Image: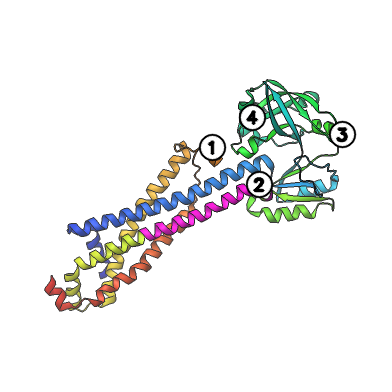
Amino acid sequence: MNLPSFIARRITFQSKRTFSKLSVRIAILGIMLSLAVMILSLAVMRGFKEEIREKVRGFSGDVMVMKFDLNASLENSPVTASPESIRKIRALPAVAFIQPVANKPGIINANGEVEGVVLKGVDKTYNWDFMKKILVAGRVIDFTDSVEATKEILVSRYTAARLKLKVNDDFLMYFFRNNAPPRPRKFRIAGIYNLGVEEVDRMYVIGALPMVQRLNNWSPQQTGGYEVRIRDFDHLEEAAARVDDELGIDLKSNTIIESFPAIFQWLSLLDVNTEVILVLMIAVAVINMISALLIIILERTGMIGILKALGQTNWGIQKIFLYNAAYLIGYGLLLGNVLGIGLGLFQDRTHFFTLDQTSYYVNFIPVMLDFTDIMLLNLGTLAICLLVMLLPSTLVTRIAPVKAIAFK
């Protein structure tokens, strides 16, 4: 029989001392809350990064191929990529799809209001999967009739609200080129989308690429660039380098991180915040356990003296209290997992806790629970707490058997 483990179980689960019971419960509560907060912090951080990243890359792709020039305006320079280059990029294992796009700034005039926007032109090969998810009214552009498609447009809910527009409404949009007079075009709203990223929602409307080509006097082979979607975002830089290798000397590629630096810098700050929370919560758990263990040792002074008188070694007595600490930590971790995972699953299913979308890009707190994170948090908390417990447990070496028995 493992004597230290047996005595530790008796101390932990059959103790009748009121004061130590209170300290033990406080320690367990501290560990439970600390682990639950750490689980939720990591889950929310992962959820935020995943949700916002998917929104931005769903709208703009992962890699943008454009002309290699000094053009820094919102209007693209014309690109004529060779069919061979496009075929090679599409054949790369890391590439999910590639699609032509072109931007054309313009001004919408509707209901006595004007709004400056950028028309993003797409063609019949455009992948509409993401846009269909964020549509709040109407439908996507139908390219079955190429003539009618050039008259249709998608606007954001932000723009529709500012200009008091709804699905099937018509409006004029004015385009400018060099010193030429403005060129008005009439569009009909086919659908309204809501990305939730104000920088994008207030700027972009989506129309037909052939319309942009006609406005710019481009040939059907010319476009403003190509959006490339990568299968695995974690290998973005590597995939972007492979795409760049297939481009001619007149083309360049930019990753989505380079195109939206402010958003991705903000997301990277979440990692720092999460690290601070983890350190603070571990500190809370450790301090609670140290306090509880010291109280238990002091209350068991008489028992320690008797065990020493019977020949038990200091290390053997230390193991009793380390086992005791392990049982308490394990119980706290179990409750912490139930609380943290339970709240995470509840939020993931119900979106009960909401946010201001204009400030956080999402209208609810996104949660992404990861089994590996949870396992590492449990093992890390257990290991750190037990290692720290070695120091207060050495208090038993300073207790003299004669005095301890007399104290009892």
Tell me how far mark 1 sits from mark 2, CA to CA.
Answer: 18 Å
Q: Which residues are magenta?
A: 258-284
Question: Residue 381 or 87: which is nearer the viewer?
Answer: 381
Measured as percent of width and height from the top left, residue 20 is found at 21, 60
Mark 1 closeness class: few <14, some 14–19, many ≥20 residues within 10 Å: few
The kind of residue on which mark 3 rests is: Asn
Tell me how far mark 4 sits from mark 3, CA to CA.
Answer: 28 Å
| Mark 4 or 3, nearer chain start | 4
Mark number, residue 217: 3
Determine the image quadrant of residue 109: top right
| Mark 4 or 1, nearer chain start | 4
The kind of residue on which mark 1 rests is: Gln
Looking at the image, residue 198 sits to the left or right of residue 378; the answer is: right
According to the picture, the residue beneath numbered tag 4 turns out to be: 159
Helix, strand or loop at mark 4: helix
Mark number, residue 357: 1
The answer to whether the residues at label 3 and label 1 have Cβ atoms under 8 Å apart is no
Mark 2 closeness class: few <14, some 14–19, many ≥20 residues within 10 Å: some
Does 134 appear above or below 295? above
Looking at the image, residue 360 sits to the left or right of residue 144; the answer is: left
The kind of residue on which mark 2 rests is: Phe
According to the picture, the residue beneath numbered tag 2 turns out to be: 260
Question: Residue 346 or 30: which is nearer the viewer?
Answer: 30
Measured as percent of width and height from the top left, residue 27 is found at 30, 57
